[in-house]
Image (cartoon, helix red, strand yellow):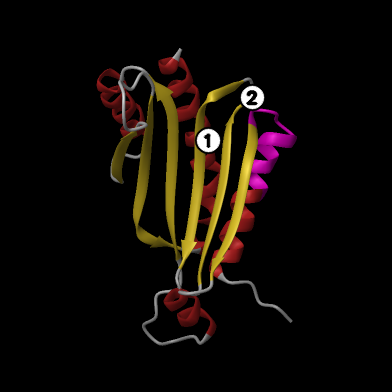
Amino acid sequence: MFDPTVYDNLKVGFENHLYDLDNLDEIIHISNRKDNLEMASMSREFILEFCLRQHTEVKGEVVLRSSLEAIAAEILETPGGQPGCHLELRFSMMTQEPEVLCPAIRSIVQLSWPAQRLVQNIHYVYGGNPTLYDVSTNIYFDRSVNEDQMGDIPELCEHLVNVLTQLVQLHN
């Protein structure tokens, strides 16, 4: 019988809560889902992309990753092994004023996740005079997450929705 890993259990936890926010509560709309197995490194990655209903201008993503080492430590019950996953949250939007928007986004995001590492990127098409910039903000949880954090998923998703709401207001 298949024994689910920490990665599998956390993935199902996020799926259940976010799909409930989509299908039952109709607060968000899930616009993309990826469940990747990287055959070269035998790592796994799950990405769930969503936006607020009627507000597709700001996107959010939950990214869950697990390495071969973490999966092997769990399955083989390696003494001192570190079974768990890496969690990343992403937000993105298009803007004409990244210099104004990036500090405001940083302030909003740091209210919900003050202790987490935050990286912002600005992307544009090279050549010519860019008129639109894709601003992305990534929040990295630099510690391993495991089933001990399953109870935190509803609160984390609530923070995601609150940040999305504030970013939509900022965008408009």
Q: Residue 77: x, y in percent?
A: 49, 85
The N terminus, quarter of image: bottom right
- Label 1: element kind: helix
10 Å crowding of disc 1: few (<14), some (14-19), many (20+): some
Most foreground residue, 65 or 20: 65
What residue do we see at 27% from left, 18% from top?
Answer: 100
Secondary structure mostly taken by the magenta-highlighted segment of the chain: helix
Q: Looking at the rendering, which quadrant does residue 18 occupy?
A: top right
Q: Which residue is outermost to the front?
A: 127
Mark 1 lies on residue: 158
Mark 2 lies on residue: 53
Boundaries of the magenta span: 16-28
Is 18 situated above or below 134?
Answer: below
Q: Residue 91: x, y in percent?
A: 44, 35
Q: Which residue is outermost to the top?
A: 172
Residue 27: within the magenta? Answer: yes
Q: Looking at the image, is mark 1 or mark 2 earlier in the sequence? A: 2
What residue do we see at 49% from left, 56% from top?
Answer: 64
Most foreground residue, 145 or 133: 133
